Every structure is written in structure tokens, then in C-alpha cells.
């Protein structure tokens, strides 16, 4: 008996940690390009404001509009993927993100900039939960948190890349790259991501059907849900305050463009190690089984 258990454990240890490496690679790549669009605003906002004659209040609204779209897009996109499948939502989100980013580089007024930043935020928000799902499905359960952590490093990596690209004299370049890049993933998403969604599985069993509120607050989950939301809100607030306003604040105090960008790049480097360590810590000491289901 012990020998059989030992052989099973040895076989599990040799099993690959990733079920679909290409799925994780696509999630990282799209997350990287999504991050470039969102983070580039912080690097380029002073020059953007100068070219489009934005005052400080208008600049603040421009930076916040994409985040508002991000929130709405994540809520709507996640639910729509449950109903209609992930692939169409990913494709639509990529198109919106690309349109919003390229539109940012082509904006000619404050009003047009608000519209395209909202479109970009909606696309990024709709895409983000799909990327987390893709990363989770690409890995075995014992490596899932690490895979999601790897996907999350795409944001800090994008911060580094955006900081370097923003040093180019024309601030529009970074948004053109953030807009054209996602379009290259469209054929790969069409081929690799299933068209169906979890809703088809739910219809097979009426016992598992539940309302949105019951899923969040039922079964004594309300306190846990509120705590998770509070932590996520506070951490996200800190992250986006740094990303959107640190370069502007440093420049307002006489720090040069290069030094301001380096400060945000260093912050992004810390985010890479934090995401990797967090994901690996969650997965640590979990048992590996070669025949585990895709989700626990």
C-alpha cells in the first residue's frame, strides 16, 4: 500500500504543472498590452495635458475615466462570459481596448479624450477577468495561484515597458503600441479559447443555479465578501494612485522626466516579485495529482 502511494506521489511530482502553456502565454501577453494602455496615462499625462490644453481637473478626470470603465467592464464582461462564453467577450474586449488606445493617440480635444479613455477602460475591464480565468485553466490546481501570479506580473512588466516607451518625445507612440499589439492576438484567441461558457454546464443541473447576490452573500459569505472587496479596493486604490499620479507629482516638485519614470519603473519591479511570491506562497505544500480536475 505504501509502495503504491509512493509511486502515485512520484508520478504526480513528474506531471507537468501547466496543462496549456500557450493559454498562459496568451494571458500574459494580453495582460502586458492591457497594462501598457492603463499605465501609460500616468507617464504621459503632463505632456498630454500640455498638448490638449487640459487643466488639472480635466487631467484628473481623464485619468479616472478609464478606471471607471475598468470597473464597469469587469462586472459586465465577467457575467457576459458566463452567459455567452469567454471567446466572444475576449474578442470584443480586445477590439474595444485597441480602439480606445489608438483613439487616445488620435484624440484632438478634452471631450474626445474622455470618450476614448472610457472605451479603453471598458475593454480592459472586460478582458481582465478573462485573463485570470485563462491563467487558472492553463495550470494544474497545485500550480494555479502561481500561474495567476505569473499572469499578474504582466502589469508591472508593462509599467517598465511603458516607462521606457514614454521617454520617446512623442507621447502618442506608447498608445499606438498598446492599441495595435492586442489585435495580433485575435487569430490565436479564435483558435485556442473555447467558444462555450460555464452557463451551459449550469443548465445541466438546476441544483447549482443561484442568484448573483446569493453567490456573494449566501451561506454566511457576506462578511468574507466585504472583507475581500475592502482589501481589493484599498490595494487597487494605492496601485493606481502611484501609477497615474507619481510621475506628475514628482515633476511638479522639479524632478526631471527621466528620474520620474525611473521611480515608477522601480515601483513596477517590486510588483513583479510581489506577484510571484504571493502566488507561489499560496500554492506551497499543496498536493499534486495527475488526474485533478481543472478547478477545485
Image (spheres, rainbow, N blue to C red):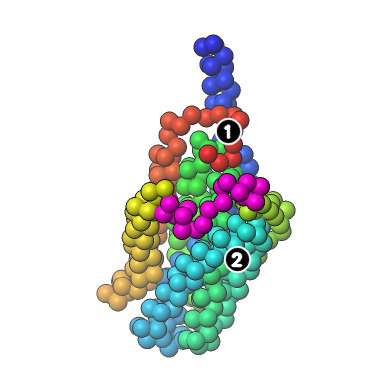
Magenta stretch: give its range.
202-218
Query: Which residue, given by chain and number where applicable, does mark 1 sit on?
Result: 292
Q: What residue is at 51 percent from the left and 41 percent from the top?
A: 144
Q: In which quarter of the image is the N terminus?
A: top right
**In the rendered view, does 136 fall on the left or right side of 260?**
right
Q: Is residue 216 visible?
A: yes
Single out the residue that lies furthest toward the front.
207
Query: Which residue, given by chain and number where applicable, does mark 2 sit on?
Result: 93
- Where 81 falls versus 14 (above or below)? below
- In terms of depth relative to the viewer, which is nearer, 213 or 278? 213
How many residues crowd mark 2 within 10 Å: few (<14), some (14–19), many (20+)?
many
- Where 127 falls versus 109 (above or below)? above
SS at circle 2: helix
- In terms of depth relative to the viewer, which is nearer, 257 or 76? 76
Mark 2 touches mark 1? (CB < 8 Å)? no
Single out the residue that lies furthest toward the left.
253
Residue 194, percent from left and from top? 69, 51
SS at circle 1: loop
Q: What residue is at 57 percent from the left and 78 percent from the top?
A: 103
Residue 294, percent from left and from top? 59, 40
Residue 240: image quadrant is bottom left
Q: What residue is at 57 percent from the left and 46 percent from the top?
A: 207
> Which secondary structure is most common in the magenta stretch?
helix
**In the rendered view, does 171 fall on the left or right side of 225?**
right
- In terms of depth relative to the viewer, which is nearer, 221 or 56? 221
Residues under labels 2 and 1: Cα distance? Answer: 31 Å
Q: What is the number of the mark on residue 34?
A: none
Q: Which of marks 2 and 1 is nearer the N terminus?
A: 2
Q: What residue is at 45 percent from the left and 75 percent from the top?
A: 65
Residue 151, percent from left and from top? 51, 50
Amino acid at each position: 500500500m505504501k509502495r503504491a502511494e509512493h509511486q502515485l506521489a512520484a508520478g504526480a511530482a513528474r506531471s507537468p504543472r501547466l496543462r496549456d502553456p500557450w493559454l498562459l502565454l496568451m494571458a500574459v501577453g494580453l495582460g502586458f498590452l492591457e497594462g501598457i494602455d492603463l499605465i501609460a496615462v500616468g507617464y504621459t499625462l503632463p505632456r498630454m495635458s500640455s498638448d490638449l490644453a487640459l487643466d488639472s481637473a480635466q487631467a484628473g478626470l481623464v485619468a479616472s475615466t478609464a478606471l471607471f470603465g475598468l470597473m464597469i467592464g469587469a462586472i459586465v464582461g465577467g457575467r457576459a462570459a458566463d452567459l455567452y462564453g469567454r471567446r466572444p467577450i475576449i474578442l470584443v474586449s480586445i477590439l474595444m481596448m485597441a480602439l480606445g488606445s489608438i483613439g487616445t493617440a488620435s484624440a484632438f480635444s478634452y471631450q474626445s479624450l474622455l470618450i476614448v479613455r472610457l472605451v479603453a477602460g471598458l475593454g480592459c475591464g472586460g478582458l481582465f477577468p478573462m485573463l485570470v480565468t485563462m491563467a487558472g485553466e492553463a495550470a494544474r490546481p497545485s500550480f494555479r495561484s502561481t500561474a495567476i501570479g505569473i499572469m499578474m506580473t504582466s502589469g508591472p512588466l508593462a509599467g517598465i515597458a511603458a516607462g521606457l516607451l514614454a521617454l520617446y518625445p512623442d507621447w502618442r507612440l506608447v498608445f499606438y503600441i498598446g492599441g495595435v499589439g492586442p489585435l495580433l492576438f485575435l487569430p490565436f484567441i479564435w483558435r485556442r479559447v473555447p467558444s462555450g461558457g460555464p452557463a451551459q454546464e449550469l443548465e445541466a443541473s438546476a441544483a447549482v443555479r443561484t442568484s448573483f447576490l446569493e453567490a456573494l452573500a449566501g451561506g454566511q459569505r457576506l462578511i468574507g465578501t466585504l472583507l475581500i472587496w475592502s482589501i481589493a479596493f484599498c490595494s487597487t486604490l494605492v496601485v493606481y494612485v502611484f501609477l497615474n499620479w507619481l510621475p506628475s507629482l514628482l515633476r511638479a516638485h522639479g524632478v526631471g522626466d527621466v528620474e520620474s519614470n525611473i521611480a515608477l519603473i522601480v515601483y513596477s519591479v517590486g510588483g513583479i516579485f510581489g506577484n510571484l511570491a504571493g502566488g507561489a506562497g499560496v500554492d506551497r505544500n499543496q498536493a499534486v495529482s495527475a488526474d485533478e480536475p481543472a478547478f477545485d
